Image: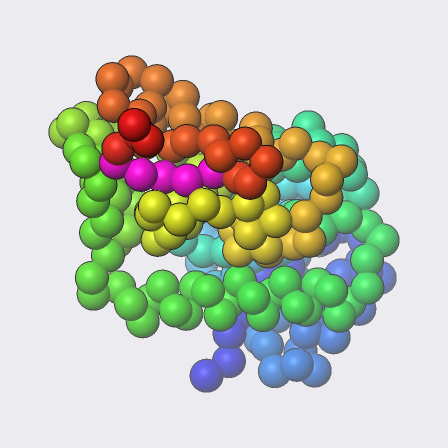
Amino acid sequence: MKHNILLVEDERKLADTLGAGLSEHNYNVAIAYNGQEGKDLFMNSVYDLIMLDINLPYINGYELCKMIRQKDKNIPIILITALNFIDNKVQGFELGADDYISKPFEFRELHARVRSLLRRADVIQELAGEKIFKVADLEMDINKKEVKRAGKKIILTAKEFQLLEYFLRNMDKVVSREDIARDVWEMNFDPQTNVIDVYVNFLRKKIDKDFSQKLIYTQVGMGYVLKSEADS
C-alpha cells in the first residue's frame, strides 16, 4: 500500500523536485505552495506523513504544525527550513514536530527520515492492541496519548511523550544521549548541542517536580535512567 504524503513548501522548484523524487519511490505526494493551501489539503484528505517549510505565506509552518497536531496527535511531521538554530528546533518540537531537517540537504537524507518515521508509525499502528505502561504511580496510555501520575493527568508535547515512552520501554536501563538521539530524534548525536538535556529537564518538571518519589535519574557520565526506586 502506498503512503500518502503532504508536502507544504513555497519554493516551487524545490517542492516539485521533492515531490517528483518521492513519487519515484512509490509515495503519493500532494503539494501545497503556501500555508493556507496546506491547511485546506490536510482538512480534506488523509495523509500518513506531512512535511512543512517554516517560512510559508499566509500561515507559517509553526502555526500549521500546531494546528495539525491539535487535529491529529499521531501523524508524523517533518519541518524543512533554512532556520538552523537550536531555538527554532526546540520551538518546532514543542509544537509537535517529529523531525527537523535543515536546508540545504540531500534528498537521500530526507528520504531516509521519511522512511524511518513511516516505519515507526506503521509499527505503532500494528501494536496498538496493548499500549499501557505503568511504573510506580505513573501510567502512560499509548492509544489515548495520555499520561497520568497519581491519577493526575499530565500534558506533554509530542516529543516529550516520545521521550517518556522511550524511557518506559527501557525502564531500569541506563540510556546515553547517543541512544536517545538515535532512537527518539533519529539523528546522530551532536555533542555541541544540549537539546536532549533540555528535553529531559522539560519532562522532569512535568513528571517528577511535584511528586516526592522521583522516576528519572541522571547517571553521571553515562546518561539517564527511569526507575521506580532510587539507589540506596
Residue 69 visible, this angle: no
Residue 197 visible, this angle: yes
Q: Report the front residue among 197 and 107.
A: 197
- Write the residue at 63% across / 41% down: 61
Q: Report the front residue among 49 and 208.
A: 208
On screen, residue 87 versus residue 173, left or right, reads right
Q: Is residue 226 magenta?
A: yes
- Write the residue at 26% across / 19% down: 211
- Write the residue at 53% across / 55% down: 183
Question: What secondary structure do most residues of the magenta stretch adopt?
Answer: strand
- Across and down, in percent, residue 121 comes to 43, 64
Q: Which residues are magenta?
A: 224-228
Q: Number of marks in the image? A: 0
Give the vertical position of 9 relative to 118 (above or below): above
Q: Report the front residue among 229 and 198.
A: 229
According to the image, what is the colour scheme of the structure? Answer: rainbow
Q: Is residue 189 magenta?
A: no
